[in-house]
Amino acid sequence: VRLYQGLMRFATVDLSNFYLDIAKDRLYISGTDDYRRRSCQKVLYHLLEILTRSIAPILPHTAEDLWRNVPWKTSSSVFEAGWIQPEPSWSHEDPETDAAMELFRRVRMDVNKCL
C-alpha cells in the first residue's frame, strides 16, 4: 500500500503539478533539436522507463501494456528488463540544491494561489 501511495503522490504532486507543468512549455516552445527540449525529452524517457518498471509488481498488465508500446524497449517484457539501475550521477546529497528547490516550490505555490 505504501509503495502505491508513494508512486501516486510522486506522479500527482511532483510530476504532474510541478515538473510536467514546467516541462510542457519547453516542449511546445523550443525547437526540435534545441538543447532544452532534448534534455526534457531525456528526463521524460527516464521517468517513463523507471515508473513502468516500478509499477510492474503491483500493476503488471498496465506495465506490460506500457512496455510493449515504447519504442526503445530493451526486452520483450518489463519483467525481463530487470529492476531499475539508476545512473551514479543521479544520486546527490546537496543540501543547497534541496533548499533552493524547496524555496522554488513555495514561491511557485504562492504564485499559483494568486493566479
Image (cartoon, rainbow, N blue to C red):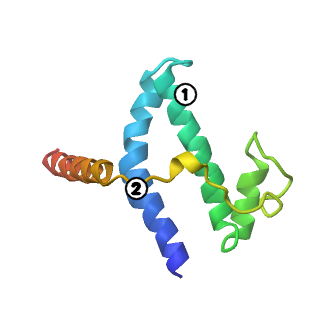
Kindly identify the residue that appears in the image at 43 percent across and 59 percent down.
Answer: 12
- Looking at the image, which residue is at 69% across and 63% down? 62
Q: Quadrant of the C terminus?
A: top left
Whether the residues at callouts 2 and 1 have beta carbons within 8 Å, the answer is no
Residue 67 image position (x, y, % from top left): 75, 53
Q: Can you tell which quarter of the image residue 32 is in?
A: top right
Instruction: Name the N-terminal-most of marks 2 and 1.
Output: 1
Q: Is residue 61 left or right of residue 21?
A: right
Residue that label 2 marks? 93
Q: In this view of the protein, which residue sits in the foreground, 63 or 3? A: 3
As helix, strand or loop, the secondary structure at mark 2 comes to loop
Circle 1: residue type: Arg
In the image, residue 18 lies at what x, y percent? 36, 49
Q: Which x, y percent locates residue 37?
A: 50, 27
Crowd rating for badge 2 (residues with CA inside 10 Å; few <14, some 14–19, many 20+)? few
Residue 25 vs 4, above or below: the answer is: above
